[in-house]
Image: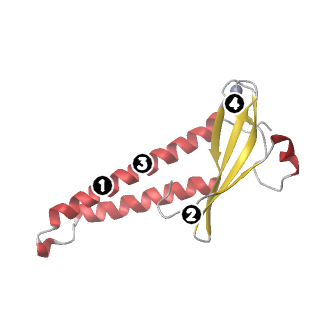
């Protein structure tokens, strides 16, 4: 979940109706069991008026496993957000503000905390890439 992000506009619909939906990525994806998984829901995430990507939920009929795949925009967003957090935290750690009032050390810890969030962002980016590769499009 992105801080400050509004609730995603989530749409659930029967897989049978998918073919008539004007959404991108309506393709079925290949499950880990090699079965075909249908898209069962799409969540369009927004940050204010900016679209920050979509999450597609899939359900395999063969093994009943459920998984989610993010689109390109969501991948780019998680990478940019993690990189921005990383840059800000590096600046704070290397040159912590507040040295005039003796708050240098506590502000440095704030930078370290931000760096942890950046790391979580990169891990989530890696998992999103992994899901895309693990569950390729059926056609
Ligand atoms: Zn399966």
Which tag, 2 or 3, sits closer to the chain's start? Answer: 2
Which tag, 1 or 3, sits closer to the chain's start? Answer: 1
Q: Is residue 50 depicted above or below 42 in this figure?
A: below
Q: Position of residue 123 (x, y in %)?
A: 45, 44
**21 left or right of 51?**
right
User: Closer to the observer: label 2 or label 3?
Assistant: 2
Q: Which residue is mark 2?
A: 6
Q: Which residue is mark 3?
A: 120
User: Distance from label 1 to label 3 (Cα)?
Assistant: 11 Å
- Label pair 2/3, CB-CB below 8 angstroms: no
Q: Which residue is mark 1?
A: 113
User: Closer to the observer: label 1 or label 2?
Assistant: 2
User: Distance from label 2 to label 4 (Cα)?
Assistant: 30 Å
- Label pair 1/4, CB-CB below 8 angstroms: no
User: Closer to the observer: label 2 or label 4?
Assistant: 2
Which tag, 4 or 3, sits closer to the chain's start? Answer: 4
Q: Quadrant of ligand 1?
A: top right
Q: Position of residue 124 (x, y in %)?
A: 49, 46
Q: Is mark 4 within 8 Å of ligand 1?
A: yes
Which tag, 1 or 4, sits closer to the chain's start? Answer: 4
Label 3, residues with CA under 10 Å away: few <14, some 14-19, many ≥20: some
User: Distance from label 2 to label 3 (Cα)?
Assistant: 20 Å
Label 2, residues with CA under 10 Å away: few <14, some 14-19, many ≥20: few
Q: Mark 1: which secondary structure?
A: helix
**54 left or right of 116?**
right
């Amino acid at each position: 979940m992105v801080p400050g992000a509004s609730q995603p506009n989530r749409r659930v619909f029967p897989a049978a109706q998918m073919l008539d939906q004007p959404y991108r990525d309506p393709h079925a994806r290949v499950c880990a069991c090699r079965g075909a998984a249908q898209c069962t829901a799409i969540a369009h995430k927004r940050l204010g008026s900016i679209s920050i990507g979509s999450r597609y939920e899939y359900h395999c009929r063969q093994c009943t496993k459920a998984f989610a795949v993010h689109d390109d925009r969501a991948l780019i967003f998680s990478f940019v957000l993690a990189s921005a957090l990383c840059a800000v935290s590096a600046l704070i750690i290397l040159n912590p503000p507040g040295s005039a009032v003796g708050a240098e050390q506590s502000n440095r810890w704030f930078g370290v905390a931000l760096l942890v969030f950046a790391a979580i962002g990169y891990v989530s980016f890696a998992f999103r890439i992994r899901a895309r590769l693990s569950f390729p499009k059926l056609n």
